[in-house]
Amino acid sequence: MKPNPLARWSLRAVVAPALVATLLTAGLSGAALAQSTPAPELGGMVKLINCVDPSFPPMEYYEDQNAKEPIGFDIDLTNEIAKRLGLEAEIVPTEFTGLLPGLAAGRCDIVASGLYLTAERLAAFDAQPYYDTAVVLITLADNDSITSPEDLSGKTVAVQAGTNYINVLNDLQAKLEAEGKPLMTIQTYPKQTDAIQQLVVGRADATISQDTEQAFREKAQPGVFKIAFTYPDTQTFGVYYRPDEAALGAALKQTIEAMRDDGTIAAIAKKWNLPESGANYTGHIYNPDEENATPAATPTA
């Protein structure tokens, strides 16, 4: 594995340049101010193209079946980054399993689509962190039988294909088998919206997702779902880019750190009903070889 490019990062405050526009110009509410960030030479780039999987609200999703353009946290983030770099933002809807292959093939410049930092992904790509989140088990609100991962024994769990949630479930499955307990039935679906729908129709007892999704669900469908369990270790979403794009990486680092320091990322989070504290990202890198994928923790009430 190549040396971890994130290990040397400092989260020291960046001295931001003069304030030039309010977030209202980007359609954001609140009094936070946008800043102009000088970008390194980007080789004549005109557009900043972001591949996203628009099935993960509120990070990126279609507002309704007639919508032609996705909306969400990551869309606002991309638009603001592009504006500060003097580029035009372009969003390319892509299946989740094709996000990083699309980046590798040059179909996009970045992937900012609810992907958290993992050692496996960072072996092939570089990334700039931008928001902290937590992995959670989600059930229907009236389901009192699941309060910990071990309670999934004998249950059916729906999960999005290609995500790290499958690794979490596989680790738990191995633990259940070693203890002689009934195994889970693991169902995989191409989209996270498909996975959570299985709870509604009664085909699954739980799904694994991020606390960001439950925050959205509570606003869009109050009282339907709940967080049954929160894994204790936070994860960090990252903007992925090709490792040979050093200038772009430097521009992303400078711009996103400035957006963190001037409150822009917190304002975007607030707009989408997400914890503003997530903007103070840690840069945590998930590595299943170094940490327990199914740790004990206090269930969320």
Image (cartoon, rainbow, N blue to C red):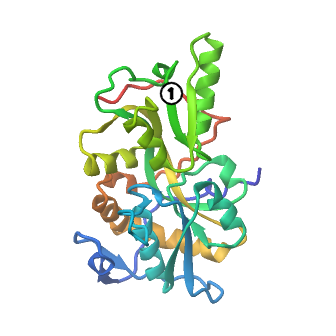
Is residue 50 something that shows in the picture?
yes
Q: Is residue 14 visible?
A: no
Q: Is residue 263 left or right of residue 70?
A: left
Amino acid at circle 1:
Thr
- The front one of 290 and 59 is 59
The answer to which image quadrant residue 70 occupies is: bottom left
Query: Is 279 situated left or right of 4 in this image?
Result: left
The relative height of residue 38 versus residue 224 in the rendered view (above or below) is below
Per the image, label 1 sits on a secondary structure element best described as strand
**Residue wearing tag 1:** 156
The residue that appears at 26% across and 50% down in the rendered structure is 219
User: Label 1 crowding class (10 Å Cα cut-off): few <14, some 14-19, many 20+?
Assistant: many
The answer to whether 9 appears left or right of 71 in the picture is right
Residue at 50%, 51% (x, y): give it: 236
88 vs 11: above or below: below
Q: Position of residue 10 (x, y in %)?
A: 53, 59
Q: Is residue 50 above or below residue 45?
A: above
